Amino acid sequence: MDQSRLLDKGAWRKYLFYTDMIVWGIFAVAVAYVVTNMYLVGYYEDTTQVASHESSWWKAFIGLAFMIGSLSWVFFRFWKNGYKAMRRPF
């Protein structure tokens, strides 16, 4: 493999940091999206507007999927970095 294409540890950590910030942003937007759509689901459930009720459930599930995906990344990075920190002597 060509050595010029390899990233050093500093650059790799910088890219992972930016990726983590993007994932946290996706999580924040997904939380707001889910809260808004769950409110709409409750509103449509109360007023029994069936057509809008079904689309709001789907929108809420889409937001939940993004929340689960971003939290999976966060927990993976948390446990991986915790394992690395435990292996490194003080």
Image (cartoon, helix red, strand yellow):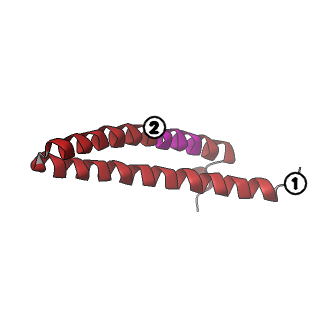
Residue 77 at what x, y percent from top left?
Answer: 60, 53
Query: Neighbour class for label 2 at 10 Å: few (<14), some, many (≥20)?
Result: few
Residue drawn at (28%, 42%), measured in percent from left and top?
A: 37
Name, please, the residue furthest toward the bottom.
Answer: 1
Name, please, the residue furthest toward the front.
Answer: 46
Q: Which residues, given as a range, are shown in magenta?
A: 15-24
Residue drawn at (30%, 43%), measured in percent from left and top?
A: 38
Secondary structure under tag 2 reads helix
* Three-letter code, disc 1: Pro
In what quadrant of the picture does the N terminus appear? bottom right
Q: CA distance from mark 1 to mark 2?
A: 33 Å
In the displayed structure, 2 sits above or below 16; it is below
Residue 4 at what x, y percent from top left?
Answer: 59, 50
Mark 1, mark 2: which one is toward the viewer? 2
Q: Which mark is residue 89?
A: 1
* Three-letter code, disc 2: Gly
Q: Which mark is residue 25?
A: 2
Q: Which mark is residue 60?
A: none
